[in-house]
Amino acid sequence: MSFVRNARLLAMRGARLGQNRSYSDDMKLTFAAANKTFFDAAVVRQIDVPSFSGSFGILAKHVPTLAVLKPGVVQVTDNDGKVTKYFVSSGSVTVNEDSSVQVLAEEAHNIEDIDVSEARQLLSKYQSELSSAGSDKAKAEAAIAVEVAEALVKAAE
């Protein structure tokens, strides 16, 4: 079989696969953490998430995706344009073919509930722990705590 014929067959198969997908015009968000459920299949316009592969925005009909959240701010824009921001420590985000999105966080809090001075105190505490850590395990744990605290301070400012 020639290269051109193979390419044509692959292109036709790809076109058929694309036609079979059923993307929705509405995006339903489920966003939860151990401490609270923030959204339960709520229809929203856009979600912006911080991930280890880079921050990205999600709209309806987004390509299916799975990503690991890094410490930072998840921003949710509802259909009226109101923006709400949440700090997440870690977790995962899943975008499905039907435009449903699940954000599952280890810990999440509304930005408005974060006290900047407490966040700075936490950062200072963890930086001290990092500098005095003796074992590799203690250093790694302290480095992770510093990373989360730095993101918390940045989010709260």
Image (cartoon, rainbow, N blue to C red):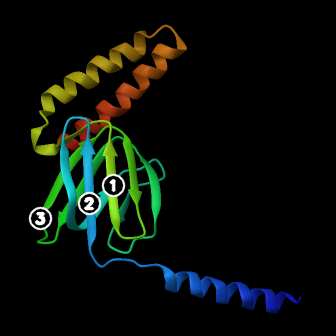
Q: Are marks 1 and 2 in contact (CB under 8 Å)?
A: yes
Give the amino acid type for the residue marked by disc 1 in the picture: Gln
* Upstream in sequence: badge 3 or badge 2: 2
What residue would you read off at disc 2? 29
Tell me the tag on residue 82.
Answer: 3
Who's the residue at 29% across and 79% down the image?
25
Q: Is disc 1 surrounded by few (<14), some (14 to 19) or many (20+) residues within 10 Å?
A: some
- Residue type pointed to by label 2: Leu
Going from N to C along the chain, the mark reached first, 1 or 2, is 2
Residue 47 falls left or right of residue 42: right
- Between the residue at mark 1 and the residue at mark 2, the CA separation in whole angstroms equals 6 Å
**Is residue 108 depicted above or below 145 in this figure?**
below
Front in this rendered view, residue 144 or 97:
97
The mark closer to the camera, 3 or 2, is 2
- Above/below status of 45 relative to 105: below
**Residue for point 40% across, 56% down:** 94
Q: Quadrant of residue 99?
A: bottom left
- Residue 52 tag number: none
